[in-house]
Amino acid sequence: MLRPSSWRGAMLLRSQYPDASPICGGTDLMVDINFGRARPATLLDLTSVEDIDSWELIDDGRTVRIGAGMSYTRIIDELSGLCPALAQAARTIGSPQIRNRGTVAGNLATASPAGDSHPVLLACWAQVEAESVRGLRLIDIDDFFVGPKRSALEPDELIRAVRVPAATGPQQFAKVGPRNAMVIATVSFALNLDTATPRVGTGIGSAGPTPLRARAAEQMLQDSLDDRWDAPGSVDEDVGRQFGALVAEAASPIDDVRGSAEYRRHALAVLGRRCLSWALQDLGEGEVAA
Amino acid sequence: MTVIETPTRITTPSVVDGVGASATRPDGVPKVDGSFIYSSDEYHDGSLWGVTLRSPHPRARILAIDTSQAEGIDGVRCVLTHRDVPGSKTYGMKVYDEPVLAFDEVRYQGEPVAVVAASHPEIARRACELIVVDYEELVPNTDPEMSLTGRVDGLFGGGLARHVRIRHGDVGAARALADVVVEGRYEMGTQDPAFLGPESGLAVPLGDGGVELYVSCQNLHLDQQQVADCLGLPLDKVRLVLSGVGGAFGGKEDLNVHIHACMLALRTGRPVRMVYSREESFFGHVHRHPAIADIELGATRDGRLLFTKVRLVLDGGAYTSTSQVVIANGCYFAAGAYDVANVEIDGFATYTNNPPCGAMRGFGAVQSCYAIESAMDRLAAALEMHPLELRMRNAIGEGDMLPTGQPVDGPAPVQEILAYLRDLPLPAGVDHGTADMRARPGGVGNVTRGEGIRRGVGYALGMKAIGFSGGMDDTCTARVTVWIRDGEPVAEVYCAGPELGQGVVTLEAQIARTELGVRTVELRDKDTDIAESGASSASRQSWMTAGAVAGACGLVRDEILARGARALGRPAGELTLDGPEIRDPAGHPLVPVAEVLGPEAVSHAFTYRHRPTEPVDDERGQGNAHVAFAYAAHRAVVDVDVELGLVKVVEMATAQDVGKAMNPAGVEGQIEGGTVQGLGLAVMEELQITDGRVRNPSFTDYLIPTMLDVPPMPMKIFEFPHPDSPYGLNGVGEPPNLSSTPAILNALRDATGLELPRAPVRPSDLITEPPDGRAEPE
Ligand SMILES: Cc1cc2nc3c(=O)[nH]c(=O)nc-3n(C[C@H](O)[C@H](O)[C@H](O)COP(=O)(O)OP(=O)(O)OC[C@H]3O[C@@H](n4cnc5c(N)ncnc54)[C@H](O)[C@@H]3O)c2cc1C
């Protein structure tokens, strides 16, 4: 067990022990160890590293920089206003115990298509700070997920932080599972109406080999909103249906123990339509937070 | 040991924490603060770890097993296969057909093939991976309908474990008179007991060649017999001690680590611990039988049931376990808690290469209650009658005849139970615009603000026998000892009836306090040194233990009073025992018990028997098979999102007759727990099995209800004293598990208008609307 107290120390140990598994909340890694799917000889424990368990505003307050060690519980408590969809996703993750330990960085490094922060990070065009002794680079979230449980992280890199643009308009996150709490998503969806640019962001979870963006749906909605961002009440109900249908089309789900591909597509169409109607309502009322 | 009259009187009703009080559980605080010793915590200096190698295939021939590489690892102490089983190569609760370690063939995925003892569990696991088993894979037989032919190669009995026939009255004639006939097929998936404490134990070799086993189980003596047979040891060389049981629900009636741990301990001469991992646990115990039921009901226009015809198929998987008894119990109650004169029931238990199924809370009656209660709602719809009204018109009562020809005796307050549910106000609707998202279908998932939500209400009624049926002579023995400590009498209760979490140890102490007036009661460890108690199953252990402990207390009391009588020179009949004092009829203290007993202890054992029963006959299934009956009903209120198929169970109201609430808090806990286990079976709990392989052996994907899935449960506990039982009590544990599932299914049918022929429902089953929301009402 390696337990660095500084980020610099963590970087050095990471390069010295390429086989060591980083561990933060341990809520993914320990499950793998208990099920015999992972048997790391060495653990690189990041929980004692200074200054990674908090957040700050950067870019003149336009972006929230969330440290790799910040728990979901703190995201819910402290970022519900700046990152409403991320906070909403955090509320759906696991149980209170899991939320006290689990982190967005761990969620990202696991890169499961069912990771609940992922659709939100896609919808918000987040960036991942990946750092090694070779230096720091910013990975656009669209380039981060490269396959099922595979990310663009290099073996010697650690996630230092995630940069999430602060909300400028309504955001939504919705997740379907057969239990009313503590459930892996059968399917999930995030929507971000960025009124500053303005533009539309989306993210889909658990409906493909990686988290996905519903590009055609984004484009369609952007075209429909066009110059009506200030008067969303005039947006036709048909837009909602089309939007839902395009979200469903963007998915490439499979049948598994958690649900059928057909159900997943159906549920995405419903979530897309409902999230949009709530977001437009909020937009009409001039609300930022969900 | 003597057999005397059943004690039913309460001697000192004013006693603190006696019978009828919500006395605190002795194991409660330790379980909460973490100091309770579960079987997985058992530890002995120098103990080794045992690990099991299991078959990856649902069916395969074993051509060879090579353990040499595994044996070569540092820290490995021994590797054992079927060749090393010293006694019987097979075991089982009813039939010895399950191999201790597989030989020739494996018949289900996860069947144990070899065991390893090593100095560290990780070393043992790695050694397991190095055991080379040469399998020739065979095509598994997994379709119970095929097994019904009784001609499937490679399955016991060609696939058919038992056919139960019940014939009562004349269904053909009744059909001709029926105004309305409904038919339906109802299926149920495989539920897992999902206890939180995995199978585990510690075996300690003894100097005399015997072995001591600390283990979590439901019946110490039946286990002892099987372990001794397989070890080739006499019974007195195999001592079992009950360790802390972290839940069982029937899944710990069959053996798990028992023989393996003992074999490893005897071979190595060292204590051996075994603890299944969560994943292994899903393969290490039996499940609830999946079911297919076809039901035909006929009634008059005004809703009088004329006939009931049922065909019930329960798949028992690879080995027998208790399948023949589960199917019998399923059949006994397949016509429900209704007075119906003409009944035809055919029940089949099958063998397949699916995971073995056996006892689970409700024992076959859960499957048949689900089916008949679903059919009753279909009949109510056909009659255009309220489902509760149809049930009240046909509810069984005292003196009515069961399909097995046995008249219902004991209290049968079904009308009272149903009337409670009828009269209870319905919960208010939810304003989904403003409500907390946890009050909505989908919960914290934030999937609806009221869109697509429909409310439904459903009812179901359940009935089951309490205790072992069919002519089993079933006993329970307890020993009670009283002695003086610091001038005060102390009682010790000793009884082998396993504490699984249901609270039987709390009752033992409550009864001793009530019968002897003592303040201090000590409970001795449960082991096989005393005569048997039977299993903590069939909702029988409180009844049986109460009979035994109260009986032993009575003998102790009589002896103390006889000694007092001698000392006082008064007839014993004039004296009463009240804790530290012997008193006269007016309540005046005459002499302290301490003075009467001095340094001597008074100790008596008592063996309790319930009334005798008889087996049913093979041809028509007739006979007085049952000790007693218990009844419960539920009213479920649900909200369903019909676009996403998500459910919020809003409320589960229930009423049950318990005879006597020995410990009201314990009774409420059982009713709540049983109701929630039934809720799980209605909306989420299913072991998904494809081609004999379990696809979700984890708590990530085998979902059980969380706090946020559990609704308020208004309940009415009736206490109609049972004439035959100690204190008038009745069994409590299983009845709430029967009607919970079908009440929810009926509520979901009410909400959606769908037939919903299968439990548990999946979200995709509940969708009535297209995804574009066009059918949504404004
Ligand atoms: C009961 C339970 C319920 C759960 N429910 C959900 C749920 O609802 N939704 C959901 O999305 N997830 C869920 N999870 C999974 C898990 O909680 C999340 O994925 C969580 O975000 C993981 O974070 P962590 O800090 O605990 O990661 P860890 O387990 O510490 O690490 C996970 C992976 O990330 C790597 N890693 C960790 N930190 C870094 C870093 N800074 N840089 C590089 N690599 C790193 C580790 O090496 C490991 O491979 C659940 C888990 C459990 C046990």
Image (cartoon, coloured by chain):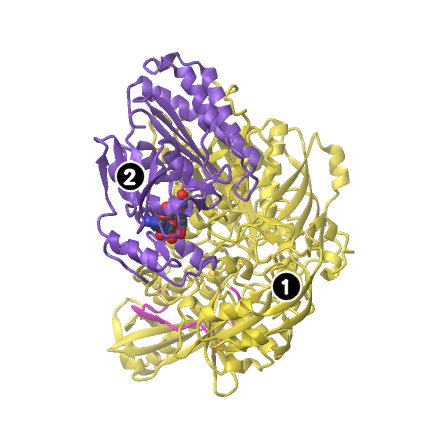
State yes or no: residue B470 in magenta.
no
Q: In the structure shown, which secondary structural element does the residue marked by tag 1 occupy?
A: loop
Of all chains, the one bearing label 2 is A
Between residue A80 and residue B663, name the one nearer to us. A80
Residue bearing mark 1: B471
**Number of residues whose C-alpha sits closer than 10 Å to that of mark 2, classed few (under 14), some (14–19) or many (20 or more):** some
Q: Are marks 2 and 1 on the same chain?
A: no
Pick out the residue farthest to the front: A134
Camera-nearest residue between B754 and B260? B260
User: Is A72 left, or right, of B170 in this rendering?
Assistant: left
- Residue corresponding to mark 2: A76
Q: Residues within 10 Å of mark 1 (few under 14, many from 20)?
A: some
Q: Which residues are magenta?
A: B514-535
Q: Quadrant of the C terminus of chain A?
A: top left
Chain B is shown in which shade?
yellow
Q: Is residue B431 visible?
A: no
Q: Name the chief secondary structure element in magenta.
A: loop
Residue at figure coordinates x 74%, y 36% from the top left? B175
Where residue B326 sits in the image (x, y, percent)?
Answer: 62, 56
Camera-nearest residue between A241 and B534: A241
**Location of residue A280 in the rendering, given as x and y in whole percent from the top left corner:** 37, 20
Q: Tell me which amino acid carries mark 2.
A: Ile
Q: Is residue B357 above or below residue A271?
A: below
Q: Amino acid at mark 1?
A: Gly
B643 relative to B349, above or below = above
As drawn, the chain in purple is A
Helix, strand or loop status at disc 2:
helix
Task: Please state which of the two labelled residues, at mark 2 or mark 1, is closer to the viewer.
Answer: 2
